[in-house]
Image (spheres, rainbow, N blue to C red):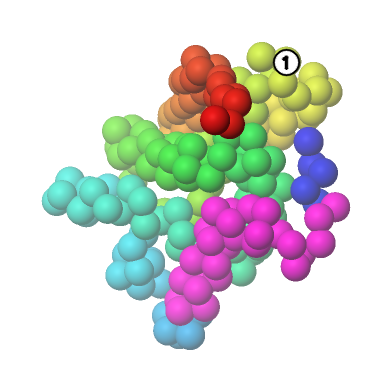
């Protein structure tokens, strides 16, 4: 499952271009925030595109997407980056570039939409919801027997621990997990229905 960790870094962008692009955007946005000198200021987070419920109410729905690329603390940036490196490349390889990108963005936005529906107050940043969405994909792969059951159980334990630690955001995380599960089911079913290419003899 984690064989991508054996790939040399110089080859990583060629093999996993979508994951690499997400990394690049997150790094650029993080450096822009750090260089702004705003520090630990929620008002500055909002200026940079953080999720905040009352801005969503005013119609700024793009804030369901922008927080996925905004990390305002070094610990948050490193933790989300490591999670992306650990869980994302295998899914880009399995689903393909476009399908993976759809999964990543849609589950992340769904998770933040869940926070909005739950009426969670506060200013939030980070790719947490997209990572939960990827874990939801792994749940489906485990159910289908497409990854080793031991790995599936390890991921389940990882998710349960994190849900307990962030119980105030529980509804958003569950929405992201469920969205990832459903999207994986739809995409795999769709791909399995595609006709196999027919080899034709050259004329």
Q: Who is closer to the viewer here, 114 or 202?
A: 202
Residue 146: percent from left, percent from top: 72, 21
Image-based side of 122 in relation to 94, left or right: left
> Residue at the front extreme?
203
Q: Main secondary structure of the magenta part?
A: helix
Does 148 sit left or right of 174 as displayed?
right
Q: Nearer the viewer, residue 33 or 137?
A: 137
Q: Is residue 34 above or below residue 4?
A: below
Can you give x and y, in whole percent of width and height, for residue 37 in the image? Answer: 45, 85
Residue found 47% across the figure and 33% down from its top = 176
* Residue 196 higher or lower than 91, as above or below: above
- Which stretch did the figure color magenta? 6-33
Q: Report the residue marked by disc 1.
A: 145
The image shows residue 99 at horizontal and vertical percentages of 49, 37
- SS class, disc 1: loop
**Residue depicted at 43% across the width and 44% down the height:** 105
Is 9 in the magenta? yes
**Is residue 199 something that shows in the picture?**
yes
Q: How busy is the neighbourhood of tag 1: few (under 14 within 10 Å), some, or many (20 plus)?
A: few
Q: Residue at x 46, y 79 (%)?
A: 32
Residue 130 in sight from this viewpoint = no
39 sits to left or right of 52: right
Residue 11 in the magenta stretch? The answer is: yes
Quadrant where the image shows the C terminus: top right
- Is 172 above or below relative to 148? below
């Amino acid at each position: 499952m984690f064989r991508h960790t054996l790939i040399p870094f110089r080859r990583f962008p060629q093999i996993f271009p979508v994951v690499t692009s997400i990394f690049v955007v997150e790094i650029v946005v993080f450096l822009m925030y750090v260089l702004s000198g705003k520090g630990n200021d929620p008002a500055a987070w909002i200026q940079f595109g953080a999720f905040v419920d009352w801005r969503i109410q005013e119609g700024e729905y793009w804030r369901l997407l922008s927080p996925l690329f905004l990390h305002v603390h070094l610990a948050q940036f490193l933790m989300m980056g490591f999670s992306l490196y650990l869980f994302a490349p295998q899914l880009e390889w399995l689903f393909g570039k476009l399908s993976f990108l759809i999964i990543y963005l849609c589950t992340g936005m769904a998770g933040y939409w869940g926070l909005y529906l739950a009426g969670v107050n506060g200013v939030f940043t980070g790719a947490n919801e997209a990572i939960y969405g990827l874990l939801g994909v792994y749940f489906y792969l485990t159910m289908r027997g497409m990854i080793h059951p031991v790995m599936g159980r390890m991921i389940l334990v990882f998710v349960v621990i994190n849900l307990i630690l962030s119980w105030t955001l529980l509804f958003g995380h569950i929405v992201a997990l469920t969205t990832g599960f459903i999207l994986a089911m739809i995409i795999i079913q769709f791909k399995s229905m595609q006709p196999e290419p027919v080899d034709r003899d050259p004329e």
